[in-house]
Image (tube, helix red, strand yellow):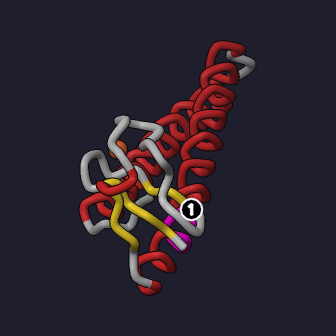
Amino acid sequence: MKWRCTVCGYIHDGNTPPAVCPKCGAPAEKYEKLDEERAKLIDRSRYTNLLEVTLIELLDKVRDIAVRIEQDALDPKCVALAKKVQVAAWELGQNVKAELEGHMQKGKWG
Ligand SMILES: [Fe+2]
């Protein structure tokens, strides 16, 4: 069962709402019980959003490694490839962030 704070949007998992909202301090009466469909969407969103956040972290690591390869400057082809990798990883990361923003706007969050 999931409950949503109508004041701040905090989602609580449990059989009853919390006595006090852990985020904003609103009383239990300010919580609404979410229907099963909405609760399932939140669970699915948590899973997908976690995967996408992990992807962003990995792409940041890829960029960091590519920067180090560029700085190492063993040979011009390596440097050129490292620059391409930096741009590609940055663009992919920005695309994933845009997807996450889309999820939030569609209520696929929680
Ligand atoms: Fe709250």
Depicted 23 relative to depicted 95: above or below? above
Q: Quadrant of residue 41?
A: bottom left
Q: Is residue 18 left or right of residue 50?
A: left
> Secondary structure beneath disc 1?
strand
Q: Position of residue 95 (x, y in %)?
A: 38, 54
Secondary structure that dominates the magenta span: helix
Q: Position of residue 63 (x, y in %)?
A: 58, 32
- What residue did someone put label 1 on? 13
Q: Is residue 38 left or right of residue 82?
A: left
Q: Quadrant of residue 47?
A: bottom right
What residue sits 29% from the left and 45% below the top?
8
Q: Position of residue 25 (x, y in %)?
A: 37, 36
Q: Would residue 16 be counted in the magenta stretch?
A: no
Q: Nearer the viewer, residue 12 or 40?
A: 12
Amino acid beneath label 1? Asp
Q: Quadrant of the N terminus?
A: bottom right
Q: Would residue 47 be counted in the magenta stretch?
A: yes
Q: Quadrant of the C terminus?
A: bottom left
Span shown in magenta: 43-48
What residue sits 48% from the left and 59% below the top?
17
